[in-house]
């Protein structure tokens, strides 16, 4: 039997069996934070949100990952969070379940494959891992969302699609633990393409108690069309999870993404960040919560932001959707023009 069959048929299936929804639920009932919730309120007007800035780690034991998510999400909910946003590649921290990987957090994946004498291509390994990461993470975040009664955007991972090709995918769960939907990253880094990752081709929008939400990923925020399309589809909140492989962090360079997009399009924005040494990369970034300039008291467009770019933090703020609704008519827009010309332009491109 070859190494691929051994990993697929025995080890990874065993790991998946050990992390069923029932076992995760039992774990949370013992270890979850006992959060006292206040009275129900009208989330259509105001909602408290949390952006997680997580220090990257490779977890050998999925329950160590579950405990980390439990602590971070539980703390956010203790402080009133009704929507928690996790970073890009958050789910890839589960890659440590593959033998030898958890010991190489500062080593790139190709080197780890060689060091552990695993005779598989990088794409093979990512697809094998991705199927298991998908099963584990969807069970984990479904149970966390249900236990804490909160919306959770899971952050992303490299997950095989129905065509068995690799995509960078994030998930959104509601307070009942129901999977509302998923989003594929549309704009890839060259490095991701080298790994065999394929781009998506659409922006999805999901209905919640506080309105419609879009959950594009990292580089998707580099292009203004991402937010404009989400807004045209009814979104008033857009999340951007990041895992930025830039050891020389520059605040102003980082502002080219979500902050600029929020100023161009009348939406609130939430950025979550994975930071630290991970799979041979130094990840940097600042989690934050953003609004149009006119809706922030100091006219900066920043509601709340992490104090650091390389440490673990939880950034929280309350979003006032009524003020956003009142602000929209002030904008100079021409939707008839867009509807007439943009579909043809984008189709041609």
Image (cartoon, rainbow, N blue to C red):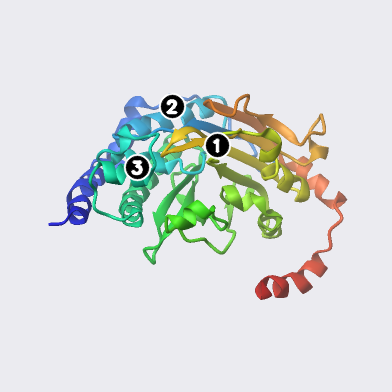
Tell whether label 2 touches label 1 (CB within 8 Å). Answer: no
In screen coordinates, is 136 left or right of 300?
left
Residue at 84% x, 63% y is 334
Q: Can you identify the residue that label 2 sits on?
A: 71
Give the spatial CA distance, label 2 vs label 3: 20 Å
Q: Which of the two discs, 2 and 3, labels the residue nearer the N terminus?
A: 2
- Compared with 8, 23 (above or below) is above
**For residue 140, which quarter of the picture?**
top left
- Which numbered tag is attached to residue 86? none
Q: Is residue 201 left or right of residue 68?
A: right
Circle nearer the viewer, 2 or 3: 3
Q: Nearer the viewer, residue 227 or 153?
A: 227
Local secondary structure at mark 1: strand
Question: With respect to residue 188, does 86 lie above or below?
Answer: above
Taking the image as drawn, is residue 37 in sight? Answer: no
Disc 1: CA contacts within 10 A as few (<14), some (14-19) or many (>=20):
many
Residue 237 appears in the figure: yes
Report which residue position mark 3 lands on.
95
Instruction: Residue at 66% x, 74% y: name it.
Output: 347
Label 2 Cα crowd, 10 Å radius (few <14 / some 14-19 / many 20+): some
State the image coordinates of residue 346 (x, y, percent, origin top left): 68, 70
Q: Secondary structure at mark 2?
A: helix
Q: Residues within 10 Å of mark 3 (few under 14, many from 20)?
A: many
Image coordinates for residue 167, horizontal then vertical, percent: 45, 57
Label 1 vs label 2: CA separation?
A: 17 Å
Q: Quadrant of the N terminus?
A: bottom left
**Which of the two labelled residues, at mark 1 and mark 2, occupies the earlier sequence position?**
2
Mark earlier in primary sequence (3, 1): 3
Dot 1 corresponds to which residue? 273
Q: Nearer the viewer, mark 1 or mark 2?
A: 1
Callout 3 secondary element:
helix
- Residue at x 73% of width, y 45% of height: 260
């Amino acid at each position: 039997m070859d190494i691929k069959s051994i990993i697929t048929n025995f080890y990874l299936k065993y790991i998946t069996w050990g992390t069923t929804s029932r076992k995760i639920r039992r774990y949370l009932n013992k270890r979850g934070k006992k959060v006292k919730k206040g009275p129900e309120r009208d989330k259509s007007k105001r909602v408290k949100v949390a952006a997680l800035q997580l220090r990257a780690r490779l977890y050998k034991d999925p329950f160590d990952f579950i405990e980390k998510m439990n602590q971070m999400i539980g703390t956010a909910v203790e402080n009133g969070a009704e929507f928690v946003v996790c970073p890009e590649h958050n789910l890839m921290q589960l890659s440590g379940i593959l033998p030898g990987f958890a010991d190489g957090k500062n080593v790139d994946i190709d080197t780890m494959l060689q060091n552990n004498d695993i005779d598989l291509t990088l794409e093979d390994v990512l697809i094998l891992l991705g199927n298991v990461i998908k099963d584990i993470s969807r069970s984990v975040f479904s149970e966390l969302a249900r236990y804490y009664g909160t919306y959770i955007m899971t952050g992303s991972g490299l997950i095989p699609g129905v065509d068995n090709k690799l995509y960078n995918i994030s998930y959104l769960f509601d307070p009942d633990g129901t999977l509302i939907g998923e989003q594929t990253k549309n704009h890839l880094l060259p490095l991701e393409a080298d790994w065999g990752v394929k781009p998506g081709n659409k922006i999805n929008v999901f209905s919640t108690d506080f309105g419609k939400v879009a959950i594009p990923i990292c580089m998707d925020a580099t292009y203004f069309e991402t937010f404009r399309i989400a807004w045209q589809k009814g979104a008033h909140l857009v999340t951007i999870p990041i895992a930025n492989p830039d050891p020389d962090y520059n605040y102003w360079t980082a502002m080219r993404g979500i902050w600029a997009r929020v100023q161009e399009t009348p939406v609130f924005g939430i950025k979550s960040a994975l930071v630290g040494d991970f799979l041979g990369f130094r990840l940097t970034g600042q989690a934050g919560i953003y609004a149009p300039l006119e809706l922030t008291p100091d006219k900066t467009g920043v509601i709340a932001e992490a104090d650091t770019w390389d440490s673990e933090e939880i950034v929280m703020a309350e979003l006032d959707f009524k003020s956003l609704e009142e602000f929209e008519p002030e904008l100079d827009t021409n939707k008839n023009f867009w509807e007439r010309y943009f579909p043809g332009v984008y189709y041609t491109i």
